[in-house]
Image: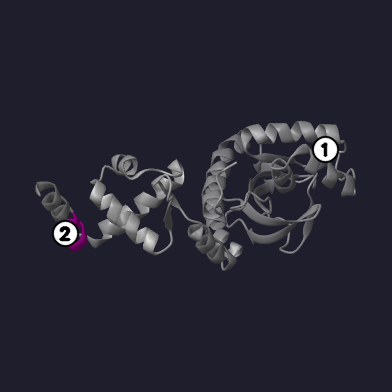
Amino acid sequence: MKENLETMNENTEADSKNPIQVVDRVFQVMETMSKTGPIGLVELSNLLNLHKSTTHRLLNSLAYMNYVKQDDETGKYALSLKLLEVANRNLNHTDILKLAHPYLKKLSLQTGETIHLVQRDGTEAVYIDKVESYVNSVRMVSKVGSRIPLYCSGVGKAMLACMSNEEVKKIWDSSDIQQLTPYTITTLEDLYERLDIIRTTGYALDDEENEEGVRCIAACIPDYKGKVRHAFSLSAPIARMSDERIQELIPHVLDLKAELSKEFGCCER
């Protein structure tokens, strides 16, 4: 009887004094179950530090709305696929440009440099957004809608580094490999070596490989399925991109990579 009264007081306080707390607990249940997989009532209650009857009530509500299901044989609870359905419907209405643009603008203001967002199209990347530097008078010649090869660009190598070497070879074999500058990578072996470095560091560099006098720092942003479609870069004339300056800018690029990866629904790679 005492246990029931304690639970009633706990529920009443949560529901009436602070309704948000109930919502908070619901999401705690779902987030915990997403990490544990199928789980029993007692174990889940212990993890949440909630009374068993409170946890059971939350699970019943989620089951009623088809977000949770219970195995008839084991009695364990697990998340249903409804969360995935909701997420997919939301992503269908997500405008990548609107989502990413404020972050690109923030990085430009932090660094004073030009930021690009690209989308992969076969063996090329297409510029889909650009935030021009407001600090420096020298402007990048890149334009939204223009294309750049994957094999010799920072954004391209950033995306290639998220793929297997087999996928990279297919793209390489389908590309028109040209020595655009004295620094352009023109052998698959050299590209493999560069991609291994990118996979370790998390960012790619364009050391005047596509255009002489311009250096870029780039990073890939896989989507929620892990599919490689987008990347961004910070670009500047070589006069403003010494090795020392690049080292100063890298943390800003990696921070944005983490933020955009989270927004795009994928764990950072």
Q: Which residue is mark 1?
A: 183
Distance of label 2 from label 1 (alpha carbons): 69 Å
Query: What type of secondary structure mainly makes up the magenta span?
Result: helix
Q: Residue at x 29, y 50 (%)?
A: 55
Front one among 183 and 168:
168
Q: On the rendered structure, is 158 left or right of 63? A: right
In this view, the residue in front, 113 or 121, is 121
Q: Residue at x 87, y 38 (%)?
A: 186
In x, y percent, where is residue 192?
A: 78, 34
Q: Is residue 167 magenta?
A: no
Residue 196 showing in the rendered view:
yes
Name the residue rendered at 42%, 56% in the picture: 68
Label drawn at residue 12: 2
Determine the secondary structure under disc 2. helix
Give the residue type that dot 2 points to.
Thr
Q: Is residue 197 left or right of residue 54?
A: right
Quarter-of-image position of residue 127 = bottom right
- The foreground one among 187 and 267 is 267
Q: Nearer the viewer, mark 2 or mark 1?
A: 2
In the rendered image, residue 66, in percent from the top left (x then y), is placed at 43, 62
User: Residue 132: horizontal and vertical position, in percent?
Assistant: 63, 58
Say few, some or many: other residues with alpha carbon within 10 Å of mark 2 (under 14 / 14 to 19 / 20 or more).
Answer: few
Residue 214 relative to residue 72: left or right? right
Q: Specify the quadrant of the image occupied by residue 168.
A: top right
Amino acid type at circle 1 is Tyr
